[in-house]
Amino acid sequence: MQNKKQFWLGALLIFIVSAIAYLPLVKNLGYLNDDWYQMYDMLVKGASFYHEIFAIDRPGRALAMIPLFTLFGFNPLWYHLSAFLFRMMGGVFLFWTGRMLWKERNFFALVTGLLFAVYPGFLSQPNAIDYQSHILALFLAMLSVALTVQSLLATNFRNKVLLIAGSVLAGWGALSQMEYYIGIEGFRFAAIIVLMWRGEDTFRHKLTKVIKASLPFLLVAGGFLAWRLFFFESARKATDVGLQVSQVLSSPLTALWWLNYLIQDFFTVTLAAWTMPVYQLAFPMRLKDMAVALALSAVAVTTVLFGLRWRGEKTSEAESTSSKGIMGETLFLSLVTMVGGLVPVILVNRHVTLPDYSRYTLIASVGAVMLLALLIEGISRRGTQITVIGILVAIAVMTHYGNTIRYVYETEATRIFWQQVAWRAPNIEDGVTLIASYPNSPLAEDYFIWGPANFIYRPEKQSANPVVVRLPAAVLTGDVVNQIVAGSGVETPLRRGNYLERDFGDVLVMIQTRENGCVRIIDGDAPELSPSDADRLKLIAPRSRLDAVITDGESPTPPANIFGKEPEHGWCYFYQKADLARQRGEWEEIPVLLNQALDGGYYPNDSLEWMPFLQAAAVLDDVKQVREMTKILTADKILGMQVCDLMTGFAQKETLSDEMKSVIGQGICK
């Protein structure tokens, strides 16, 4: 009874601390990165299309994502909550495994499970839809190993068979989601060796016991590898095992690089994971966010302190020192688990880098936290042990908060960008290639752009395969910039069931320079560019085709469950409506919008945003207004030179009074 109570109290502690680490901002997170194309495909095709999305490399992912989408739909919150539960339960099952392996080391097992659950080296938790499979697979892997250990300890034959079957099925489930999780087999077989090697038997007898105990569990890796190597053909080179391993045979130098990466990654998952992310993500936070992070860390540390005392741990004494044999077992288990977790990653020419490729830490982190818990256990006083644990928990909580706040700001920035585009563009012409620049948010893939654009403008169902992305997009790589500047080049990529036709001679450029600024849809004939815009944007801006914006009709309403509630109608709302009126030639409407904005107390954060109002005043021959705006626009010399060019060209196209032409020539271009 006492043992059960200790376990459930430990599980409760892991749950509470994990919730503090992962849940405070969960309601503010939306779609991120690869979530966009997956959810758009669900919109136009339905849940069964997951089979098409993952057919090329990990078809098992569809078996997880179809029921999850059926349950959660398009609401990102539920995916975040389920990812949290899977992550937390992974820690609980590791805690259970540690208790079974070493019955007298409850404190060690709890520290291992707790630090694993909040391990700060994995930073993709907020990307919960796309990473659902990674986190689910981790949970299944931990469950599988726990059932393996329990089966070895079971004395009832029927229970043993059921536990072995459950372990094999859970193991297959994990590998069906992520093939490189095969590294967990290092943990499994190392645990079997630890259990079977105990006692005073001869080496031969121990080896026989290990082999006999291991045989049923060879089905996990053996069964999966048989399917993967002989029945399934991967269309992705990164997940093609035979292709990657053949590189060693053709170039022995590759093996030396792999060894180099293994050494690097060993230090990354053990040391850098607890230092680099907190430095990169937590320390640069705004002061108000840092205050919240520190408060959450304090709550988490206090919870750990009271939780350990509630379980009966005393700060004045330490658990009985583990024998050299037990320490040797733990060291062996942790090192084998780390190597097992890293080798499959390295064999496909990947390796751990933080924060971009933090997902590759997940399996190795099991051994990393076990090694860390062993070092903590070696401290002589319990009070010092708990202090160290508190520091590590505080680092983890601060890291996860800093990481999550980054994604919260990215979510908000993306939503605001596309809300503004919706205000500005009633519709967009099919086939035009979208080029977008989000403020302070690098765009790694084209679907970061076309995903939200098609959600708003092309939500219609599609019956045929593949999904045709009617509003394609491109990321501004050097090659793409060159093709746009040259005004030619067509790409027709087909990726995960989505077909695009990108014409680099037909582009529409959308720029938001600052997070508090407005989105500008660029007119290539008269591009309005901020001095802060990236050079590559300035190069392609003259190629932007404004007439791809269809001005007829009402502005669309982005779905609130994806883009959030419509923001208040501040300055950027009036700017977008004025810019739309300018494109329509409705000059009389623009001063009305300006008066509404000023009456509401709204002003631009970027002087360039006065341009639609300046040009409307020029057309309407409001000399006083033009002169007042000119003072603002020419205060910056570089901006003033651009405004001179823009207004000179504008005067040539529009019918302006002689006095207005004089104001432009002498007032703006002086």
Image (spheres, helix red, strand yellow):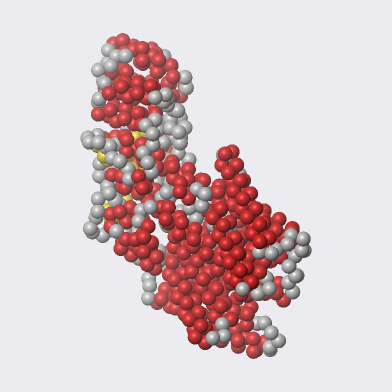
* Image position, residue 293 (x, y; %): 59, 46
Q: Quadrant of the C terminus?
A: top left
Q: Residue at x 32, y 32 (%)?
A: 523
Say which of 131 and 665 sits in front. Answer: 131
Can residue 489 be seen in the rendering of this structure? no
- Can you say whether 47 is above or below 445 in the image? below
Say which of 479 and 278 sits in front. Answer: 278
Looking at the image, residue 364 sits to the left or right of residue 326; the answer is left
Say which of 403 and 179 sits in front. Answer: 403
- Can you say whether 255 is above or below 492 in the image? below
Q: Quadrant of residue 558?
A: top left
Total number of numbered discs in the rendering: 0
Looking at the image, residue 291 sits to the left or right of residue 643; the answer is right
Looking at the image, residue 420 sits to the left or right of residue 161; the answer is left
As drawn, the residue found furthest toward the top would be 659
Q: Residue at x 52, y 49 (%)?
A: 24
Q: Quadrant of residue 61?
A: bottom left
Say which of 439 and 422 sits in front. Answer: 422
Can residue 74 be seen in the rendering of this structure? yes
Q: Residue at x 54, y 86 (%)?
A: 156
Q: Residue at x 68, y 73 (%)?
A: 104
* Image position, residue 215 (x, y; %): 52, 84
Q: Quadrant of the N terminus?
A: bottom right
Q: Quadrant of residue 194?
A: bottom right
* Image position, residue 395 (x, y; %): 63, 52
- Can you say whether 541 is above or below 122 in the image? above
